[in-house]
Amino acid sequence: MKSNSGAVLGLALACLLTAAPARAEDAPQSCEVPAYLLTSESSLPKVAEAVKSGHSLDILVVGSRSSTINTSDGSAYPGRLQASLRDKLPAVPVNVSIELQVKKTAGEVVGGLAGLVEVKKPTLVIWQTGTVDAMRSIDPDDFRAAVGEGVAALQNAGADVVLMNLQYSPRTETMISASPYLDNMRVVAQQHEVPLFDRFAIMRQWHDQGDFDLFSTSHGLDLAKRVHDCLGRALAQFVIEAAHLKPAQRQGALSDSAKSDSTKSDGVKPPAAQTTGATGAGNVAAVDQQNPSQQKSLTAKAIEKVKEVAKSAGDIFSRVPCLPPKGGAKSVGSLPHVASKLASGEPVVIVAFGSSSTVGYGTTSPEFTYPNRLAAQLHRQYPTADITVINRGQGGEDAPEMMKRLQTAVLDMKPDLVIWQVGTNAVLRNLDPAETAKLVEEGIARIQAAGADLVLVGPQYSPKVTERGESASKMVKLLGKVAELRHVGFFPRFEVMRDWHEKQAIPIDNFVISDGLHMTDWGYACFAQLLGDDIIRSVGQIKLGVNVPSNVQTYRPM
């Protein structure tokens, strides 16, 4: 059955590259990419050194058929990457080669990666993977292990690494579940500190904003070339940003005399600025310190961007109000440690522990992640209090992985409150709900032993989760039962979000993005608002001396 499904999916994905007449409406408008998708906290030190020294920058792309086009004119993204880098780095010899791994999973590719580096000796390896694994429904845990092993092998062989995830195709969204593979690639990238080029999100952005119609069956070779050209140019910018190259360094290595002159003038000339980001806005712009007017212009633009994001964050509920479930709300239960710290004026540490919902996948800006929204709400409520909210989310994880990092990610932070979002990936990965609940109960015991308050957050109500309705229902019920038995708070996110749709008549696409799993800006904001209201209510009742049973759960909109 899987082989037939894979054949159908392969045909559907291949339609993107079919040679047919291109349509006028397929013409791209700009194929712009949001700045946050072109930056990475991880770096490419070997690329940076090659550029700074003027040595050859040799790049090896290891990928599947989606890294090619049925032409020989360099139109696929590796060729466009080479052309764009040569344009951006005119004094640096740039050579891009491709090693096709047709119809191979990550596990089938990993064994040969070190050998490829030994033979080709690339400065950088761009490993495009995930599509074949998703088509074959490879176990996500096995996929993550294989990708992690491959990245380690490439790094040990002496190359910088960029991971590239799946291509986006709206026609196959209902046929394959991409989310577990996308999330697991993020996990590997974070663990091994390598940049991740989010091809999936970038292509979806182009489709959603109308740059390309990736749904139509009448795609032509011309469209494929234009998509690949945009990918190549975006990837070139991503590599340059991840290498943290200053504008002057992008012009290539200086001659000995130029270096000498540069050294002499260093005392009077300000250095060229590194690429910097406007705080919180994900807005990145290279600033030429020699050009005050450009610097002023870009600074003004950055400030305006921050203002726009702040205004957007403040107005998020202007069109669709965030209301508690009909029937009222109850407290998450007793939060004595948080209440006592606030009452005594001591610092409060809150750790948000979870998976991609905690990371904030799907948001348009960091301001909309639920930990950031919650922090802003608590600071408004308690303006003189010292409250820190720490985001300890890791995409793709569930209880088994979270338990392994519970000590370092959570307990070592000495939290007063832990908000543990768990269960979604267990449902998506068909993990036994009872085993998940058992692990969560063990984790609760350790958190309680450390003296912290705790609120559990269950899976979200979204199409990808409700596809596995029986498993999701068991997971929600078991997590609620564990919370009750261990006397900790429980925020039933599934029930809250279902209430939005079924009782408040809010369309699903208002609170779930197009991947059918992760929340929108509004979804995260409302989730944070209701959770924050509940925390504030519980703390207030304790400070007033109201007896709040700790096993009371939140909203019960049944």
Image (cartoon, grey):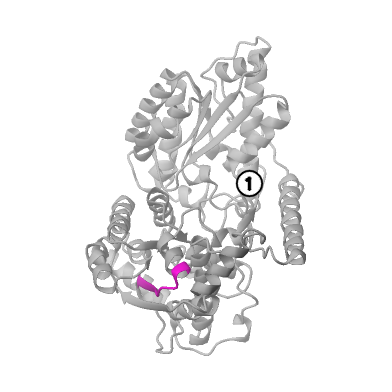
Question: In terms of image quadrants, where is residue 270?
Answer: bottom right
Residue at the spot 76% in from the left edge and 47% down from the top edge? 315
136 over 94 or under it: above or below: above
Judging by the rendered image, the residue that carries numbered circle 1 is 368
Badge 1 marks a residue whose secondary structure is helix
Quadrant placement of the C terminus: top right
Question: Where does the image place residue 75, in percent across and percent down from the top left?
Answer: 46, 84
Image location of residue 428, percent across then percent down:
40, 48
Q: Look at the picture and state if 328 lies above or below 10.
A: above
Badge 1: few (under 14), some or many (20 or more) residues near its Cα, within 10 Å? many
Compare residues 510 and 81 and report the one nearer the observer: 81
Q: Is residue 254 visible?
A: no
How many marks are shown on the rendered structure? 1
Residue 103 position, x and y percent, is 29, 71
Q: Residue at x 44, y 84 (%)?
A: 18
Residue 368 or 474: which is nearer the viewer? 368
Determine if the magenta segment contains residue 54.
yes
- Where is residue 42? Give x, y as percent: 46, 54
- Which part of the image, by quadrant, shows the N terminus? bottom left
Q: From the viewer's perspective, tell me whether residue 60 is left or right of residue 375.
A: left
Which residue is at a point 56% across and 53% down the rendered structure image? 362
167 to the left or right of 530: left
Q: Nearer the viewer, residue 381 or 283?
A: 283
The amino acid at mark 1 is Phe
User: In the figure, is residue 504 to the left or right of 156?
Assistant: right
Residue 446 figure quarter: top left
Is residue 174 magenta-colored? Answer: no
The magenta span reads: 52-62
From where the camera sits, is residue 531 visible? yes
